[in-house]
Amino acid sequence: MNPTPLAAIETYLREQRALVDQALEQFLPRAEEYPPAIHQAMRYSVLAGGKRLRPILCLETGRLFGGDEKSLLRLACSLELIHTYSLIHDDLPALDNDDLRRGKPTCHRAFGEATAILAGDALLTFAFETLSSPDPPLPAERRLRVIRELTHAIGTRGGMVGGQMIDLETTGQKTDATTLEFIHSAKTGAFFRAAVRSGALYAAAREDDLERVTVYGGMVGLAFQIVDDLLDVLGSKEALGKSVGKDGRQRKATYPALHGMEQSRRIASRLVEEACKVLAPYGSRAEKLKGIAEFLLIRTT
Ligand code: GRG
């Protein structure tokens, strides 16, 4: 009997996660390497789990355009290192002040605030050390374009830190739909877009292909964050491995707060539908990317 599409995508995601986990385990500095405290904190947060969605999107987009698996895996791991840095810093007392992440005490809870700040810094730095490694070889120009792509996506101008800044500034205030879309697209969407774009760039995709995956990545990233907002209301701490209900308590700008639950779900579904349509020219070769997008709508973790 053929597995249901949902079971098939779940199996695929599990396999891909294992691939990324194994590579991360190898790339990260050993826990006993001097100075051990920082390496232990880095490994603790990265290897605590996580869905590895950004690396998987990057790998799958790179494969779509015939990218080399070994190079793509290095790039994919760099994305996860950056993502984990953002989670560690986001959880700090000065920001979200969270105790739980990926089902475990947050980095600052486990290692102290100073070490957690350094572990975030170290992961961000290590991501670019990993990316700039000459093994496997890659034309320097292509590598540089990817580095520029990622730095822009996590920077201040329409990227992760910029989105986070506006998120902070608007907390507790009445926020309009345009500002909210900007916050989500910058804080989360830009990095999703960079995940697929960097995979495509590594595989030397053509500009028209790059444009298609850019639209896909932005829409999927925004849909992901809307579902994240919904899960903060509907999800459980046990399944998500992080605290829930915080957005409402902190009076954060979210889709459910502004548009209501039903309308937010509809917006997310429409984004995923549109994102999948953009991939139509690739036919069944883009099945996995479509499956990942659809999975994001029904995720509970
Ligand atoms: C520089 C002090 C300082 C802080 C920066 C960059 C930053 C703080 C925050 C980034 C914004 C951020 C953390 C957005 C959250 C996006 C989000 C919903 C993350 C959760 O992603 P999942 O569900 O997590 O993919 P897992 O654990 O599965 O990897």
Image (cartoon, rainbow, N blue to C red):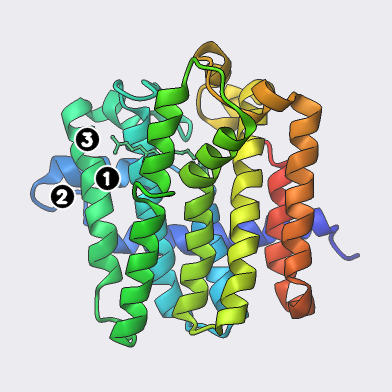
Q: Quadrant of ligand 1?
A: top left
Is 300 situated above or below 272? above
- Amino acid type indicated by mark 1: Met
Q: Tell me how far mark 2 sits from mark 1, CA to CA.
A: 12 Å
Q: Tell me how far mark 1 sits from mark 3, CA to CA.
A: 11 Å
Q: Answer few, some or many: residues within 10 Å of disc 2's Cα (few below 14, many 20 plus, some between 14 and 19).
A: few
Q: Residues at badges 3 and 2 in contact (C-beta under 8 Å)? A: no
Q: Compare residues 52 and 199 and report the one nearer the observer.
A: 199
Q: Answer few, some or many: residues within 10 Å of disc 3's Cα (few below 14, many 20 plus, some between 14 and 19).
A: some
Q: Which residue is mark 2?
A: 32
Q: Residue at x 40, y 78 (%)?
A: 71
- Amino acid type indicated by mark 2: Glu
Q: Which residue is mark 1?
A: 42
Could you tell which of marks 3 and 2 lies nearer the N-terminus? Answer: 2
Residue 99: mark: none
Q: Most extreme residue toward the top, as rendered?
A: 249
Q: Tell me how far mark 3 sits from mark 2, CA to CA.
A: 20 Å
Q: Answer few, some or many: residues within 10 Å of disc 1's Cα (few below 14, many 20 plus, some between 14 and 19).
A: many
User: Number of labelled discs?
Assistant: 3
In the picture, measured across the screen, residue 28 lies left or right of residue 273, that is left
Q: Which residue is mark 3?
A: 117
In the picture, measured across the screen, residue 115 lies left or right of residue 281, that is left
